Image (cartoon, rainbow, N blue to C red):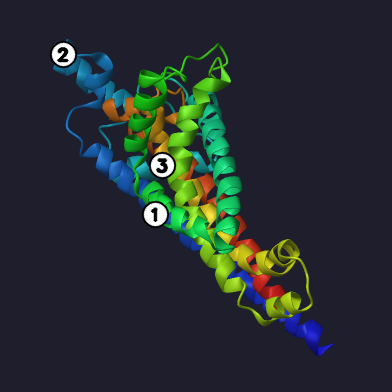
Amino acid sequence: MMVAADTKRRGSRAGRLLARLLLRRLGLLIALLATVFVAVDLLPGSTARAVLGREATPAQIAAKERELGLDRPLPTRFLDWVTDVLTGDFGRTARGRPINDLLADKFPPTLLLGGLALLCTVVLSLLLGAWWVRGGWTGRVLQPGTTVAAALPEFVLATLLIMVFALATGWLPAVTITDRSGFPVSADMLVLPVLALAIPQIGWNARVVRAALTDAAQAPHVDNAVLEGLPSRVVLVRHVMPFAAPTIVASFATTVGMLLGGSLVVETIFNYPGLGAVLAGSVADRDTSVVAAVVALSGAVIMLMLALADGIRAWSLRGRG
């Protein structure tokens, strides 16, 4: 009875902690969106002039600003936008297209690119981290290799990949061509963008996996498993990995945000048809609603992954208690 009550109490405490974390992150997202509104509003130029062109007269610009609601105070515009978003409506672009339709067209290609990069990151960092823990010459190779990989910015790595695999060898295309669905016409057009996104994250996460596995391997139950003569692979999978999982999952959840942020740069370099092009065009037009919508959608995905990581961490710690 006492054990059950204690377990229930710990579960309730973990639930309250997760709820507080979710509310805190939601507050941070709203603050970030408010900052986006202010930052775009401070950009030089006029949204109405960007839409109408240089030939527009002052009267036409003033009329367009009234049509777009740009003559209202910035706090009012932000509160109205947030209210509409809560109902599922992101509004319209400065050029009149529904933002929901724009995101529905452009977010899936970005999700495909980021998902493939995340899959490569998870698989390769787990393999490299586990291989690294075994010691030997692999540590002497992976120590500097992962450091260099993690330190390379995506745009630098993308440029190097284009120079080597597109310009020098001609093995892979450097520009993305899409079909009517909005996705690349061939799979090889995904290789370089995925590598440009995944390699820095593989370098970082391999180091996290190695550190987490090393710490978990020092637990007493792992020593007992080794003394019992269990194979090293069984010890790693059954006795080390479960204790290292919370740290590793949290690192992967953080990686989702890094991949989404990096994809906006990589998509521009490879002419990939995702949110990167949408964001670049909306900044050029000073279209605050579109920029905020992209940030809100990316933030929601990141919050979902962080919440998943928090849940796994809480479950793991609860089980140890």
- Label 3 to label 2: alpha-carbon separation: 38 Å
Of badges 1 and 3, nearer the viewer stands 1
- Report the residue marked by disc 1: 144
Of residues 218 and 94, the one nearer the viewer is 218
Q: Position of residue 22 (x, y in %)?
A: 54, 60
Residue 261 — which label?
Answer: 3
Q: Residues within 10 Å of mark 1 (few under 14, many from 20)?
A: few
Q: Residues within 10 Å of mark 2 (few under 14, many from 20)?
A: few
Amino acid type for the residue under numbered disc 3 = Gly
Q: Which residue appears at 72% of the width and 67% of the height?
A: 235
Which secondary structure, mark 1? helix
Residue 313 — which label?
Answer: none
Q: Position of residue 196 (x, y in %)?
A: 43, 35
Looking at the picture, does residue 301 appear above or below residue 15?
above
- Is 111 on the left or on the right of 80, as rendered? right
Q: Position of residue 71 (x, y in %)?
A: 25, 32
Quadrant in the picture for the C terminus? bottom right
Quadrant in the picture for the N terminus? bottom right
Which badge, 1 or 3, comes first in the chain's sequence?
A: 1
- Report the residue marked by disc 2: 57
Amino acid type for the residue under numbered disc 2 = Thr
Q: Which residue appears at 79% of the width and 86% of the height?
A: 3
Of residues 125 and 154, the one nearer the viewer is 125
Which badge, 1 or 2, comes first in the chain's sequence?
A: 2
Of residues 38 and 306, the one nearer the viewer is 306
Which secondary structure, mark 2? loop
Amino acid type for the residue under numbered disc 1 = Pro
Q: Position of residue 311 (x, y in %)?
A: 64, 62
- Is 199 on the left or on the right of 55, as rendered? right
Marks 3,2: beta carbons within 8 A: no
